Image (spheres, rainbow, N blue to C red):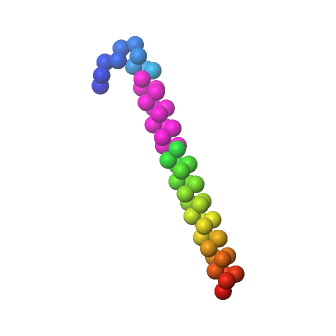
Amino acid sequence: MLDLGKYAEAVVTSWAVTILLLVLLGVITWRQSVNAKARLKAAEERRKARNG
């Protein structure tokens, strides 16, 4: 690892927060995708039932 001196704590903390935010963003995006797919499937089923 690089010798960051007195900035090591700030740099490591920044990296940890950045990685945490990226993971959180990924989870939120995934959940929205699952929700959107479920709503689309339900809408398609309603349309098929209405049109016979």
Identify which residue is drawn at 58% across, 54% down: 32
Q: Where, by quadrant of the figure, is residue 34 drawn?
A: bottom right
Identify which residue is drawn at 57% across, 64% down: 37
Q: Where, by quadrant of the figure, is residue 8 drawn?
A: top left
Residue at the extreme right of the image, as rendered: 50
> Is residue 17 covered in magenta?
yes
Residue 3 to residue 32: above or below? above
Main SS class of the magenta portion in the image: helix
Q: Which residues are magenta?
A: 11-24
Q: Position of residue 15 (x, y in %)?
A: 43, 30
> Is residue 35 covered in magenta?
no
Residue at the extreme front of the image, as rendered: 51
Q: Is residue 36 left or right of residue 6?
A: right
Q: Position of residue 22 (x, y in %)?
A: 48, 40
The foreground one among 44 and 22 is: 44
Identify which residue is drawn at 56% across, 54% down: 31
Q: Is residue 35 left or right of residue 13?
A: right
Identify which residue is drawn at 63% across, 76% down: 45
Q: Where, by quadrant of the figure, is residue 5 drawn?
A: top left
Specify the quadrant that holds the N terminus.
Answer: top left
Residue 46 to residue 14: above or below? below
